[in-house]
């Protein structure tokens, strides 16, 4: 698979929806993840990311304008021991709770399927990073309707052991803008990463469509010490 420019991938797509990036920094020191959300409706755009313990959650920027919290208010990032969970919905909690009971990432996600927001049937995308004693691996998942047919759920998991420095994988909910929105297809995209977290954050935020972008979260984890640094950018200030 060709390694792509993440900057170009974002600049050339006005509406990838929600997206997860996971990989390793070029200097080989950090486990890297990023998660962004976009929105077309007032309800979707009326959000910010806020810190919540070791993770983050979404909340309404203007509570008086919140019309339906069911699919937009959730914890995208939670930490369970040496595992960092990143998802586009409340399946974060499902993964956290079931893995805490010794089930696997895949087993936890077998209890869930795509979002009930027909006709889009938005895919549930999820990632998990395992950082322990200088070792690092990660996995990504997508649960999607069968070519727009809600009677069937297609489940895909992609696991990456000993990831290559400077590379990551990018998965997002929609192929592009549309009505209905076409679901992501294929494997997570192989993309380039950066050593400098601030520069990486700036690149991602500036590359997302100005009208549709809502919030961005980036975290770099030192996979020797396990210490991490995070950054949140919200369009609503």
Image (cartoon, helix red, strand yellow):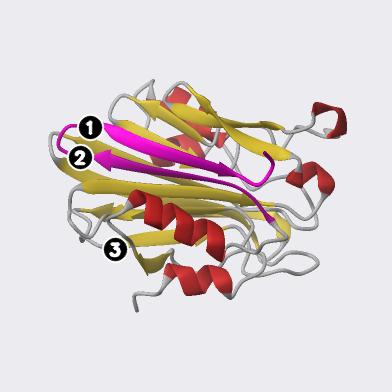
Compare residues 144 and 174 and report the one nearer the observer. 174
Name the disc covering residue 223, or none.
2
Q: CA distance from mark 3 to mark 2?
A: 15 Å
Name the disc covering residue 167, or none.
3
Q: CA distance from mark 2 to mark 1?
A: 5 Å
Whether pointer 2 and pointer 1 mark residues with C-beta atoms closer than 8 Å, the reply is: yes
Q: Which residue is mark 1?
A: 226
Task: Judge whether 78 appears above or below 8 on screen.
Answer: above
Q: Is residue 183 visible?
A: yes
Q: Residues within 10 Å of mark 1 (few under 14, many from 20)?
A: some
Task: Judge whether 101 appears above or below 83 on screen.
Answer: above
Sequence-first disc among 3 and 1 = 3
Q: Residue 75, how many percent across, how many down?
A: 56, 31
Local SS, label 1: loop
Please give left or right for residue 110 compared with residue 79 in the image: right
Q: Is residue 139 visible?
A: no
Please give left or right for residue 41 compared with residue 159 in the image: right
Q: Residue 224, how many percent across, how many down?
A: 14, 37
Please give left or right for residue 163 compared with residue 233 in the image: left
- Location of residue 173 by image quarter: bottom right
Which region shows up in magenta? 213-237
Identify the main secondary structure in magenta: strand
Local SS, label 2: loop
Residue 234 forms part of the magenta stretch: yes
Local SS, label 3: strand
* Image quadrant containing the C terminus: top right
Q: Residues within 10 Å of mark 2 (few under 14, many from 20)?
A: many
């Amino acid at each position: 698979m060709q390694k792509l420019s993440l900057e170009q991938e974002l600049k050339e797509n006005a509406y990838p929806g929600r997206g997860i990036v996971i990989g390793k920094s070029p200097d080989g020191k950090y486990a890297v993840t990023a998660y962004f959300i976009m929105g077309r409706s007032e309800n979707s755009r009326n959000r910010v990311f806020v810190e919540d313990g070791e993770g983050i959650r979404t909340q309404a920027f203007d509570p008086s304008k919140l019309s339906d919290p069911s699919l937009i208010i959730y914890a995208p990032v939670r930490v369970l021991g040496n595992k960092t969970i990143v998802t586009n919905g409340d399946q974060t909690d499902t993964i956290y709770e079931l893995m805490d009971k010794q089930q696997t990432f895949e087993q936890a996600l077998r209890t869930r399927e795509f979002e009930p927001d027909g006709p889009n049937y938005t895919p549930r995308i999820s990632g998990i990073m395992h950082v322990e004693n200088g070792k690092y691996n990660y996995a990504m998942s997508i649960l999607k309707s069968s070519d727009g047919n809600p009677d069937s759920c297609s489940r895909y998991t992609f696991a990456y052991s000993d990831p290559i420095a400077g590379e990551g994988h990018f998965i997002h909910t929609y192929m592009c803008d549309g009505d209905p929105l076409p679901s992501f297809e294929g494997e997570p995209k192989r993309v380039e990463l950066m050593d400098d977290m601030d520069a990486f954050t700036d690149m991602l935020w500036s590359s997302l469509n100005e009208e549709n972008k809502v919030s961005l979260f980036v975290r770099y984890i030192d996979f020797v010490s396990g210490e991490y640094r995070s950054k949140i950018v919200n369009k609503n200030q």
